[in-house]
Amino acid sequence: MVALTWHGHSTVWIEDSGTRLLTDPLLRDRLAHLRRRRGPLPRLPGAPDAVLVSHLHADHLDFASLRRLPARTLLVVPAGAARLVRRVLGPAAGTCTELSPGEQITIGRVTVRAVPAHHHPGRGPWSRQQAPAIGYLIDGQARTWFAGDTGLFDEMADLGPVDLALIPVGGWGPTLGPGHLDPRAAAEAVRRAAAACAVPIHYGTFWPIGCDRIRPDRFLHPGDDFARHATAVAPGTRTVVLHPGQSVTVRQS
């Protein structure tokens, strides 16, 4: 059984076998030109046992948010990212562990394994900092796939079957570039991974001011659009569409 709370964007609090994990924490209301447009400011129920960071982009590796966590918190990051994390956070970096696809670590009573993701490896368009993007498979009482941020790739079929997929279905602007999933492609992803249950994430939270009025279909609709596509292409997958701040408990299939 997995209990989770989606705090918007790619920030998910996961509890499995008494182990508490936090993915890609973005715990504030503003990031550069983006504003939190839906959902409350995250209030964590305590300190996570570990943070899982999928890639270097600022909306996934947010140093201001990491500074809000206890310094002892274990940070799991893609291979090549630890040097940047330690340089920026200093002593606040705590324990920082790098994983490449196929490598794993035991955290509490769960095993966390890095898996591939197809997404830009850089920190930003003008940054020299790079580390390959990854996702994570969390094995405890259930098997959970946190996809991070990714486009489709053939090896997704090798990840399954999974009990729960936390799958990105949108973004934070009116367009999506390469290395992302829209609702239709996300439905295909959960079909390939043979997910028993899927929760759409990475949409409908942060948005440039005004854009949610100009293109509400790109802001509000991706979760429901994903559920509709998943019903068609992955009828064996149960979809749970949450609003930021909502929680759900998922049992092993």
Image (spheres, helix red, strand yellow):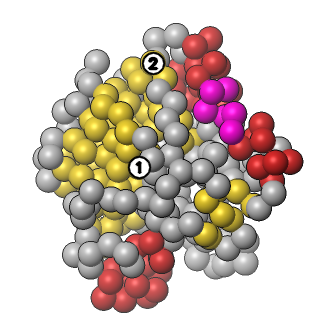
Q: Tell me the SS state at disc 1.
A: strand
Q: Tell me the SS state at disc 2.
A: strand
- Identify which residue is drawn at 81% across, 48% down: 213
Tell which of 171 and 181 is nearer to you: 171
The residue wearing badge 2 is 238
Q: CA distance from mark 2 to mark 1?
A: 19 Å
Q: Is residue 233 above or below residue 6?
A: above
Q: Report how many numbered discs are placed on residues in the image.
A: 2
| Residue 231 in picture, x, y percent from top left | 58, 13
Answer whether residue 219 is visible to the viewer in this image: yes
Q: Is residue 62 above or below residue 87?
A: above
Tell which of 41 and 12 is nearer to you: 41
Check if residue 231 falls in the magenta segment.
Answer: no
- Identify which residue is drawn at 64% across, 46% down: 204
| Residue 128 in picture, x, y percent from top left | 64, 79
As drawn, the label of residue 12 is 1
Q: Amino acid at mark 1?
A: Val
| Residue 93 in picture, x, y percent from top left | 33, 80
| Residue 250 in picture, x, y percent from top left | 31, 28
